[in-house]
Amino acid sequence: MTKPTVTITNGHGFLSDCNDKTGWTEDPAKTLTATSLTVELDDWFKLTGTASATAKKTYWERNFTDISALTYPSWIVRLKTSEASTGLGAKVEIVYSTGATEILFGATPVFSTLCTVKTGTIVNAGGALWISKIRFYGVSDAACNAKSVYYDFALLHKGVFTFPNTELGKEWIPPPRNVFIEIPSRVTDVTQNLGGKSAKWRCSCNLDIGRLSTTSGTCTGDDWKRPQGVDSEYQTDTVKGEVFDDLSHNSYHEPFQWLNTGMGRQIKAVLDEEPRFREDGDKHTVDLVFKEYSRSNKSNESYVERFGLNIT
């Protein structure tokens, strides 16, 4: 059985949480009609349009301060579409400072009526180094009337940190919120359901297990330091688990990260409580708690979408 992989994003270059369309402008050469971009539930962009035939399209783009494609080579987008097909599909593209473009995904329009996640690495085949814009598309695969693409967030980031282990355990906690009211002379309490709390994921890791076989053959690298998978002379982190110091410190301007729990759930998450680095004699561990993040009421999604159970 394959060992489950736990990963988390780190190092934001550009993030749109799709709650504010200020600064977003539409394609002046659009071929869709009756187009609009609205913010739904303070959490989603809803891109709507009507198409007379296949391959009709529009995009909304955001111009931002240039970021390095070398520093921020990774991307992730969460989305859904109003139709399973025969409507508007999703496509996301970046624009370099040179004017060159690169499709992140959607060369063939992407459809999913369940919230789904697309991830990848910037190809940068043309050699351009600075990213200036991002574009959210709606692209038709047939004639359609007032169909929509929904974008939850787009993140350009430094990379994904893979936990070398969660050897000391991990647990997933999706708690409901119930109040039990005691009534005099009544047998059993009155149960009042008040919705649900944000889910939590806890883990405890052994920082003394993290070595890799490396290109030099001397096995000097330690995957609790970044970049992972290289010899120590090429690693820029000073201490093991430094990525969690990074996440904790930068939480003031990085609202959330994308967490793959390795337990079949994937969510927007923030560090909760205090990361605890412990030294017990010659043993070194770190205890972590991540908490689910959402701008909107998650009752607007199914539990499958909310916890990413459909994402492979």
Image (spheres, grey):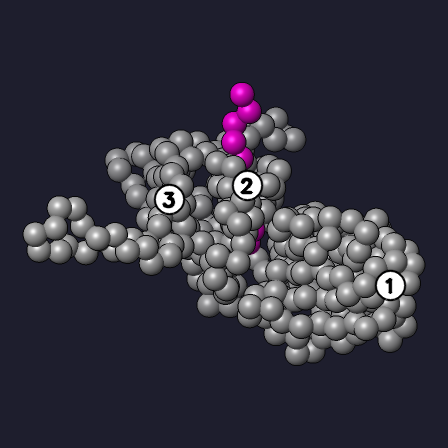
Helix, strand or loop under label 2: loop
Label 3 neighbourhood size at 10 Å, few (<14), some (14-19), many (20+)?
Answer: few
* Apparent side of residue 284 relative to residue 28 in the rendered image (left or right): left
Among the two numbered marks 1 and 2 on one chain, the one whose residue lies closer to the N terminus: 1
Q: Residue sitting at 90 percent across and 72 percent down?
A: 29
Label 1 neighbourhood size at 10 Å, few (<14), some (14-19), many (20+)?
Answer: many
Q: Quadrant of the N terminus?
A: top right
Query: Distance between the Cα atoms at labels 2 and 3?
Result: 15 Å
Residue 8 falls within the magenta-colored stretch: yes
Residue 174 vs residue 254, the one in the foreground: 174
Give percent across and percent down for residue 147: 76, 61
Label 2 neighbourhood size at 10 Å, few (<14), some (14-19), many (20+)?
Answer: some
* Apparent side of residue 29 relative to residue 5 in the rendered image (left or right): right
Q: Amino acid at mark 1?
A: Ala
Q: Residue sitting at 7 percent across and 52 percent down?
A: 185
Query: Distance between the Cα atoms at labels 1 and 3?
Result: 44 Å
The residue labelled by disc 2 is 309
Q: Amino acid at mark 3?
A: Ile
Report the predominant secondary structure element of the magenta stretch: loop
Q: Residue sitting at 50 percent across and 47 percent down?
A: 303
Q: Amino acid at mark 2?
A: Leu
Residue 8 vs residue 88, the one in the foreground: 88
Give percent across and percent down for residue 199: 41, 50
Give percent across and percent down for residue 18: 62, 67
Q: Quadrant of the C terminus?
A: top right
The residue range painted magenta reads 1-10
Q: Are marks 1 and 3 in contact (CB under 8 Å)?
A: no
For residue 223, above or below residue 72 = above
The residue labelled by disc 3 is 173
Among the two numbered marks 1 and 3 on one chain, the one whose residue lies closer to the N terminus: 1
The residue labelled by disc 1 is 51
